[in-house]
Image: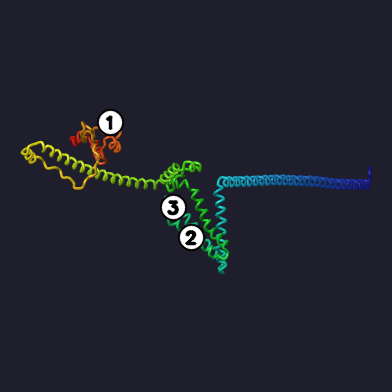
Amino acid sequence: MTSYVEAEAEAKARTLAATADAKIAVRDAETDRKIRAAAAEADLESRRIANRAAEREAKSTAKTAEAARKSESRRTRRAARAERRTAAVTRVTGYVAGNMPGVYSAGIYAMALYVAVSGQIGVATDRGWPVAIGIGMAAFLEGTALAMALTAHQQRLKGERALTPRVMTWVAAGFAAAINFGAHTDDLVMAAVLGASSLAAIIVWEVRSGAKHRDALRRLGLIPEPGVRFGVRRWLRYFPSTFAAWSLDVKSRVGADAAALLATVEADQAAAKARTEAAKTAAAAEKAASRDAAKLAKSQAKAVKRSAKDETPADTAEEADQAPAPAPVKARRARRSGPAKGKRSGRTVEVADAVLVDRIRARQNETGEAASLTWVRRELHVGTGRGNRLLDLAAKPADTTEAAPAVAID
């Protein structure tokens, strides 16, 4: 058996061993906890490091993508700007190539206007006026001319004559040129250049504007179509016919409104001429009728005298009482109208009007045209007055023609 001391020592030893084991267990547990905590911390740190690396990678990727996007956007914008510039240059180049006269005229107008305005500003500054007054004076003078020119152009496109604004255009331009010339008379070259610049600006604008809208003005009938060109060789070789054709072109090449007015004038002139010719024809016919009546009266008187010689005095007296009085004859001797005559058995016979009218009608039926006065005078051997009267009788229906008997005369 063990003693009490031994038992107590053994108990203490067991207690100490248990305490040591407990402490060791506690320390092992603490150490294990610390190890697990360190491992967890290390794992957490590694995760943090991995997260930070992932974040950095994501940020780098996003930054790279943003940089790529921005670079692509810049390239797109640069390409768009380059395309717009190319298109603008192409448009400008095409416009300049297709409108070279207009572009060049605009440049000349701008230069002439600049010279004119600078001269007018110099006029103001030489007199001690402020530059603003010189600019205002130049804008007033040159602007007035341009404003009136624009107004006149607008009115002409509406079909009006625009006489007032056109006159005011040249009045303003001439006034500006006079100021530029008169203020620089000490240097005639400078005065001439400055004066001409004020006129050149509005002249260039007027000419170019008229050329640009010429088709519209033609459609409105304000200006005629272009004239016909014959060429120098044609003028030199065939001058008379070329001049006649040119004159006809000048006469006929007018606007629509002018053509209507000229047609009215020509119609009035033709009517007046026709009335004059009709009056002359009527007067000639009346004179011819008077001459024929006088000749017929003379022939009747001669016939009465010849018959009186062959009859007895009683018969003569009786017939003289029964015979009608001869037609009165004018005192003035009428011009011989040349009656148509034919030779028959040595006697001169005056052909009746009815026979001559029948010949005229036969001629008209054969040719299908109206007989002319020249043919009547030549073929029927009559004068102008009787020829006109015969033509008038031939123009009437056949049943209304008055037949005159043929009278034999010596």
**Quadrant assignment, res 381:** top left
- Amino acid type, residue under disc 1 in the picture: Asn
Q: As shown in the figure, which amino acid type bears the numbered disc 2?
A: Ala
Residue at image position (47%, 47%) is: 214
Q: Is residue 290 left or right of residue 239?
A: left
| Amino acid type at mark 3 | Gln
Q: Residues within 10 Å of mark 3 (few under 14, many from 20)?
A: some
Q: Nearer the viewer, mark 1 or mark 3?
A: 1
Q: Is residue 126 above or below residue 68?
A: below
Provide residue 229's location: percent of width, then percent of height: 48, 43
In the rendered image, the quadrant that contains the C terminus is top left
- Please, what secondary structure does the residue beneath circle 1 have? helix
Vertical relation: 119 (above or below) 280: below
Asked which secondary structure carries label 2, the reply is helix
Residue position for label 1: 365
Which is closer to the viewer, label 1 or label 2? Answer: 1
Position of the N terminus, as image quadrant, is top right
In the image, 167 versus 32, the foreground residue is 167
Residue with the mark numbered 2: 172
Callout 2: 10 Å neighbours few (<14), some, many (20+)?
many
Residue 123 point in image, percent of width and height: 55, 65
Q: Residue at x 48, y 48 (%)?
A: 213
Task: Using a 10 Å C-alpha cutoff, classify the residue at mark 1 as few (fewer than 14 neighbours), some (14 to 19) or many (20 or more).
Answer: few
What percent of the width, then of the height, locates residue 137?
A: 52, 63
Q: Are marks 2 and 3 in contact (CB under 8 Å)?
A: no
Q: CA distance from mark 1 to mark 3?
A: 60 Å
Give the residue at mark 3: 155
The reply to whether the C-beta atoms of the residues labelled 1 and 3 are less than 8 Å apart is no
First of labels 1, 3 by sequence position? 3
